[in-house]
Amino acid sequence: MERRNFLKNLGLGVAASIVAGKSVAGELTKSMNPDMTQLNTHEFPALPFEYNALEPYIDARTMELHYDKHHRTYFNNFEAAIKGTKFDTMPMEKIFASISAAGDPVRNNAGGFYNHWLFWNNLAAKSAGPSPKLKAELEKTFGSFDKFKDAFNTAAKTRFGSGWAWLYLTPDMVLATGSTPNQDNPLMDISPVKGTPLLLLDVWEHAYYLKYQNRRPEYIDAFWNVVNWEEVNKRFEQAS
Ligand SMILES: [Fe+2]
């Protein structure tokens, strides 16, 4: 099935991908993230908010460069890397499930394309909070909501160099935090943290340097003001 059609089908309900309780990609996760219809590959997806929507926590110039330069470049390079290969018609999740065999150009740019798309959708000007169900699960797993934030913040602060911090649901359906280097993500077979992404934070310097310079912890603290919990709740609901 072409990836475009695969993603469209997912729009009819994630149920399409969890027939027999498995994702199309296989055993990695029970389901993939919702709203993959937005990720109509071969077309660069729109940013779901204005560049200045997240001010003052994430400034407009950073958002413009991040989306229109960095993200777009990952998309263009991904398209170029898969053109004429078996990956051209492969669902993203399946690419990630066999990324160790794909080579660095596909690994880096597929990750860069997908991770940023997911990241934009877990940001919003108005931040509410986790649903009662997710909050209860976070408290059960981490001890309290604040302890969950501490664990996530530690993952983000201690990622050496460039990468991402994650809240994800393991294949055993347990919430966990962790980080990945470069543009890797928990859907990749080479990732030390595996599962369904629920919440992620870009800790590449390009995500914060204009406003925060070397003060990554300030950027991480600011991030909590613009988390799109509605989307995170939805991902959790679909995956659990
Ligand atoms: Fe980025």
Image (tube, rainbow, N blue to C red):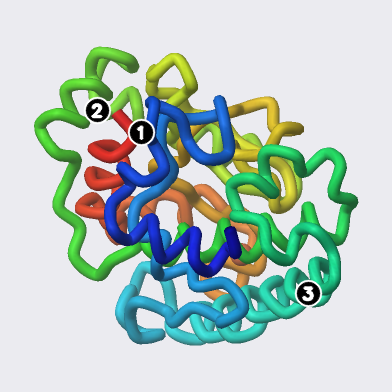
Instruction: Tell me which amino acid carries mark 2.
Output: Phe
Q: Secondary structure at mark 2?
A: helix
Are the residues flagged by discs 2 and 1 in contact, CB closer than 8 Å?
yes
Residue 149 is marked as 1
Q: Secondary structure at mark 3?
A: helix
Q: Is residue 90 visible?
A: yes
How many residues crowd around disc 3 within 10 Å: few (fewer than 14), some, or many (20 or more)? some
Quarter of the displayed picture in which ligand 1 can be seen: bottom right
Residue 196 is marked as none
Hey, which quadrant is residue 191 in on the image?
top right
Residue 77 is marked as 3
Residue at 19% x, 40% y: name it. Answer: 130
- Please provide percent x and percent y for residue 239: 34, 34
Residue at 64% x, 59% y: name it. Answer: 214
Residue at 46% x, 50% y: name it. Answer: 220
Is 92 situated left or right of 189 in this image? left
Instruction: Tell me which amino acid carries mark 3.
Output: Asn
